[in-house]
Image (tube, rainbow, N blue to C red):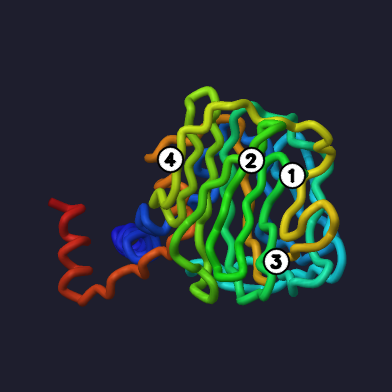
Amino acid sequence: MCLLVLSSLLVLLLTSPSLAQQDLSSALTPDLLGWWRSLPGFTGGDKFFDSTAARRHGVLSGGTTWKADMVLGTPVLVLSFDGTTDGVVIPGALGAPATLSIVLWASFQADADGGQVFSIENSVVIYINNTGLINALYGDGTTTHTIAATTSIIGTGYHCIVYVVNPSGAAQTLSIDGEQVAADTSALAISYAGATNTYLARNPNDNFDVTGTIAEVRVYSRALSTAEVRSLSAVRTPARPPPSLTFAQILSRFLFFFQ
């Protein structure tokens, strides 16, 4: 009996993941308008599935393919775009939210024209220009309000990009990997006039296509806080491997339970 207990404790001590190793993919799920990702066991197909009750599944277009990749230490299937007639079309304008936060994990390669990463028609847009700078904008029906990063992320692996549009709070912000890189005090309401669909990696005219990969996209119906943006940027941070334990350290942990 004692041997059984000791064996069970040994397994627990050596295999139990630390907090840093826990699956954080479900963090911050309230107020989601859409959450597109490949779930464990997913093997591909012609849709980018929405995990929320809305079931706004995106349809792959052009030559969009699935690719096995490592996203900051986690093996997943990601969407791969070659910059030519690729993309994903999501039906509708996500309810035309007055306030929203867009979160996506993506990696980009050089493209002579840049590409439109996310857009609700032309009302709310995230794009990467031909020098690798992320730009974000929304239109109020008369004026386009644009903010932009100042550091290229071309060829630098996966990044967490967060664009928050909060006209009622007189703010729009752009963050990359948890750090705010651009902001302004735009207070005019978003205009969704003519907005019928949402797009990934292309614009409504099926051009300005992205060269790169997208692993996951979330859209919230509220403005994420600075702390939440930082928390989400860490969701796909690779877990540290458990430390190697010496025999003496293992023995001391066993003895602790019998003190």
Is residue 224 shown above or below 60?
A: above
Q: Position of residue 156 (x, y in %)?
A: 49, 73
Q: Residue 63 appears in which quarter of the rendering?
A: bottom right
SS at circle 4: helix
Q: Which residue is mark 3?
A: 210
Q: Give the Cα separation between the discs numbered 4 and 2.
A: 27 Å
- Check if mark 4's residue and mark 3's residue have beta carbons within 8 Å: no
Q: Give the Cα separation between the discs numbered 3 and 2.
A: 22 Å
- Check if mark 4's residue and mark 2's residue have beta carbons within 8 Å: no
In this view of the protein, which residue sits in the foreground, 104 or 24? 104
Going by the numbered disc 4, the residue's amino acid type is: Glu
Going by the numbered disc 2, the residue's amino acid type is: Thr
Q: Residue at x 53, y 76 (%)?
A: 155
Q: Residue 122, which numbered label?
A: 1
Q: Earlier in the sequence, mark 4 or mark 1?
A: 1
SS at circle 1: loop
Going by the numbered disc 3, the residue's amino acid type is: Val
Report the mark closest to the observer, 2 or 1: 2
Q: Residue at x 82, y 51 (%)?
A: 204
